[in-house]
Image (spheres, helix red, strand yellow):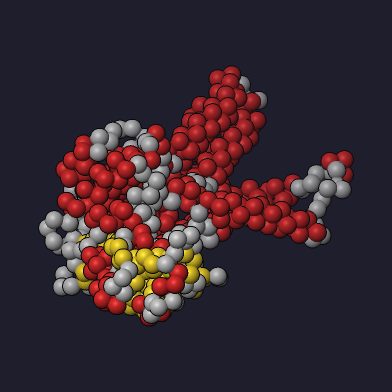
Amino acid sequence: MKLYRSLIFRELKLTRKRFLLMLILFILLSLLMLTPIMLGGLSGTSEMNEDLLSIVIFASGVVTLTGGFLAGTNNGLQKADINSGWKRYSFVLPATAKQQALSDLLVKLMLILLFGLLSAAFALVCITVSGINTAAEGFNPVCMMLNTYLGAVCAVMLIDIAYSYILMFANDKNQLKIIGVIAFVGAGVVLRVFDLFPGMNNDEKSAKDGALISQEMVNKFETVLYSEKTLLCISAVFVVICILFFLAMWRSHERREP
Amino acid sequence: MTAFDNAIEIKGVTKRYYGFTLDSISFDVPKGCIMGFIGQNGAGKTTTIRSLLHITDIDSGEIRLLGLDHIKDETAVKKRIAVVFDELPFHDVFTAKDMARIFEGMYPEWDNTVYQKYLERFQLPVKKKIGQFSKGMKMKLQIACALSHNAELLIMDEATTGLDPVVRDEILHIFMEYLQNGERSILMSSHITSDLEKIADMVTFIDKGKILLTGYKDEIIEQHGILKCDKEKLAEIDAEDIVSIRLNNFGAEVMVHDRENASYKYRDCVIDPASLDDIMLYYVHRDVKEWS
C-alpha cells in the first residue's frame, strides 16, 4: 500500500499543472454552457421549454464529452520520465513493472472518476436550473451522460494506449524526438490513406445538397445514446480498454533497453 | 537472506551491439570492498553496469548480486542496492522532501532520519525545487537518496565526473564512512583514476569490451612499473615483459607488468612506480605496442 501511495504521489505531483489546466478549461466551458440555460430557465415561459430541453441536452453532451476527453487523454508522464531519465532509473527501483502499471491505471481511474462526477454535477445543475422534468420528457439524463462520457473516455484511451505503446520504444530525449517525428508522419499517412477510401471523403457534398445526416439517423443515434443496453456494452468496452491500458503500461515498464 | 562472499559476481557476460561487443567479461566484487571500474569513454563500463542492473538484457553469461540472480530475484536485489548515475534522474519539479516521500514507499528500509542528516550535511535545501540545484547539489541529493535505505551494495556510474575537486573529495569521504561496517560494497565506475586511487580496494580495467586487469589495487600498482631506457636498450627488453612502449625524443618508457622481475633483469634501467592512470594509458595502447 505504501508503495502505491508513493507511486501515485509521484504521478499526481508531476501531472498537477496539466490537471489544473484541464480543470480550469472544464470549469470555463461549463460556465459558458450554463449561461444560456440559466437565462432560459429564469425566463420561465412555456414556449422556451422545448428549446431549453435541446439546449440542456446539447450543453450536457458537450461538457460530458469534453470531460471524457480530458480524463482519458495522455497525462504526459511517460514523456516526462524519458526526458528526466527517470524511466531508466525506474529499472533499478524495487517497484515491479506490474505495480507501476497498476499505479498508472489507478491514477487514470481517479481522473476518470473525478471528471465523471464533475460532468454528472454539471448535468444535474443544468436540469435543476432549467426546471425541466426529465421523467415527463422521457429523457434519461444519467444514461445519456454515462454513455457519452464513457464513449469519449474509451475513444481517447484507445489513442492513449497506441501513443504509450509507441513511446515505449524511446529510451532518451533523442529517441523521443525521432519517435515523435515518425508518429507525426505516420498519423498523417494514415489520415491520407483513409481519405482515399470511397465514402470517407465527402468534401464535394455541400449543405445545399440537403442535410448530411438524415433525421432518421439522428433519431437512431438518440435511441442508442439513451439506451441502457448501450450503457452495458460501453461499460464492458471500458473495462476491456482499462485492461488493455494496464497491459500496455505493464509492457512499457517491463521493456528493457536494447 | 542468502549468505554471500561476493557482492557482485559477473561470469562470462556478453552483450552485442552494432559496432561494440561486451566480450565475455568476468569479475567479482567481494563483500566489504570498493571496486573501481576503470576504462576510457566507450570501453564498456556503462554497458556492464546497465547489464548488471538489468536495464538492458544480456546475450549470455551470469550475473549475481548479493548472492542472488540479477533477473530471477530482481525485486529482492533492488531493495538492497542503490544506484547513482552520472546525471540526476529526478524531475526538476520535485523537492528533496518530495523525493523522501517517493522513496519511503519504495524501500522497506528507508530511513528519513538518515536522509535528513545527509541533507543537512550536504547543506541541501529541503523545499527548493531540484531544477534550481547546481550540478554538485544534484549529485549530492542523488547520493543522499542512495545512502538512506541501508543498501548493501552501491553502484555508481561516473558519479564524480564533472564535479569540482572539493565536492568530489567530500563525496569520496562519505563513501569511506559508508563502508565502515564491512558489510557494504561499492562498485564505482570512473575514468578519473585519481578518485579511485584514493578510495578503491580493488580495480578492474576494461577496454574495448574486454577486461584487461582485475585485482587488488595495491597489488596491481605494485606489480606494474615504468622502465625508462634509451632506444638501443629497448631492443634488449623481452617482449613478454612489455605491456606497451611510449617513445619520446630521449628514449622510451616501457610499462612492465612484473616490476620486481624487471628490476632484476634490467639492472641498469630505472623503473618508476606506475599510477592507475599510467597503467590504463599503457594498457589501452597494448595493441600498437609502440606509441608516443
Q: Is B266 drawn above or below residue A116 in the view shown?
A: below
**Image-based side of B264 in relation to A41, left or right:** left
**Image-based side of A171 in relation to B186, left or right:** right
Q: Quadrant of residue B276?
A: bottom left
Q: Is B195 drawn above or below residue A51 in the view shown?
A: below
Residue under the point 25% across and 35% down: B123
Q: Position of residue B183 (x, y in %)?
A: 15, 62
Residue under the point 30% across and 45% down: B168
Is residue B7 visible in the rendered image? The answer is no
Q: Position of residue B265 (x, y in %)?
A: 29, 77
**Image-based side of A180 in relation to A17, left or right:** right
Residue under the point 41% across and 63% down: B281
Q: Residue furthest left?
A: B181
Q: Position of residue A179 (x, y in %)?
A: 60, 56
Residue under the point 76% across and 55% down: A192
Q: Is A188 drawn above or below residue B51 in the view shown?
A: above
Between residue A208 and residue B16, name the one nearer to us.
B16
Indicate the quadrant containing the N terminus of chain B: top left, top right, bottom left or bottom right: bottom left
Between residue B228 and residue B89, name the one nearer to us.
B228
